Image (cartoon, rainbow, N blue to C red):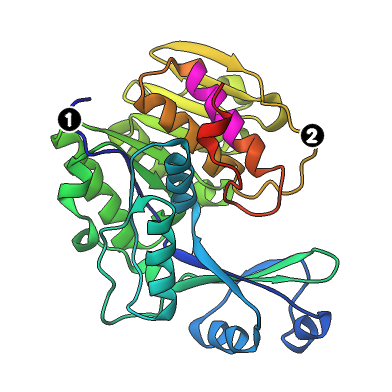
Amino acid sequence: MENARYDVVGIGNAIVDVLARIEDDLLETHGLIKGSMTLVDADQAEALYAEMTGTVECSGGSAANTMVGLASFGGRAAYIGKVRDDKLGRVFSADIAEAGVEFPTLAAAEGSPTGRCLVLVSADAQRTMQTFLGISAELAPSDVDSHTIAAANVTYLEGYLWDPPPAKQAFLCAAEIAHAAGRRVALSLSDSFCVERHRDEFRDFVATHIDILFANEDEIVSLYRAADFDEAVRALPPRCTTAALTRGAKGSVIVDGGKVYEVAAAPVEMVLDTTGAGDLYAAGFLFGLGRGDTAPACARLGGIAAAEVISHVGARPRKELASLIP
């Protein structure tokens, strides 16, 4: 589409990933189960953060990862998410900008602290995560910048953010702004537990507002309570003209304009960490979409990006994804 400043603007939980190597006794002191992911409150997050040394801090969150991946391909990306005007809020803003993603959201002067995911890496490479969503979950319609939404070919929404009612209203607001400007709206279902919590609302949202849907096999089957994957594909509503459905090592299935395409996964020598695979798949797919590629070609780019990120630890690409384009 012409006259677009951005290929994609993402909206999601703006979270800072804080990584540190730790000794097992820190886990024992705080009663943490090694390898688990737990939601914690502000006091718990602050107490643990104060004990972490030698930390590495970077912007995180599912939709943020997708926008960073898009920028790594050479796409024009923007991001909307809520941070506080505190240390970690400044870390998020600076880091995502350094990755090539425009971040127009102003830091809030009041409210909860910036969200963070404290990643405790023990000597055996196990990662124990303590997540405090903080102010990221307080995103509201007033945080949705209409000019940014209208200037993007696609507005990409992170399903994880559907839980808080104000954020849900922000999604609806963003979708209406995008469609009024003649743009498209994409949704990532994010997580099968998220789908189970909001199945009816998600189904209605997809049927009435979503043009492009991203989901894995478990999520799409759960969304439509289907007996199997094929039945779930047939249940997609007419409004959703494009669906990119990932199936792990089996690759992905794309539904586009009523046609169904099966695309093989990109080869990977060794899978070290699947964190971020879906986020980066969406980045590649959306980049291809922005440059006018066919649906199967978009899926192949998604597979290339996913293969890169699962070949190492961490949810962000280590190579410039543009260098991997065939």
- Where residue 62 sits: x, y (%)? 49, 52
Position above or below: 7 against 264 = below
- Where residue 36 sits: x, y (%)? 72, 66
Q: Earlier in the sequence, mark 2 or mark 1?
A: 1
Query: What amino acid type should be assigned to the residue bearing mark 2?
Result: Glu
The residue identified by callout 2 is 269
Residue 225 in sight from this viewpoint: no
Q: Name the one closer to the observer, 194 or 111.
A: 111
- The quadrant in which residue 56 appears is bottom right
The residue identified by callout 1 is 182
Residue 9 in sight from this viewpoint: yes
Q: Outermost residue, top direction? A: 259
Position above or below: 233 against 284 = above
Give the main secondary structure, helix, strand or loop, of the magenta stretch.
Answer: helix
Query: What amino acid type should be assigned to the residue bearing mark 1?
Result: Gly
- The quadrant in which residue 9 appears is top left
Q: Residue at x 38, y 30 (%)?
A: 212
Magenta stretch bounds: 297-305
Position above or below: 245 against 197 = above
Q: Residue at x 60, y 24 (%)?
A: 252
- Where residue 58 sits: x, y (%)? 52, 65
Looking at the rendered image, the quarter that the C terminus falls into is top right
Position above or below: 46 against 304 = below
Label 2 and label 1: CA atoms lie apart by: 42 Å
- Where residue 17 sits: x, y (%)? 55, 66
On whether residue 202 falls in the magenta region, the answer is no
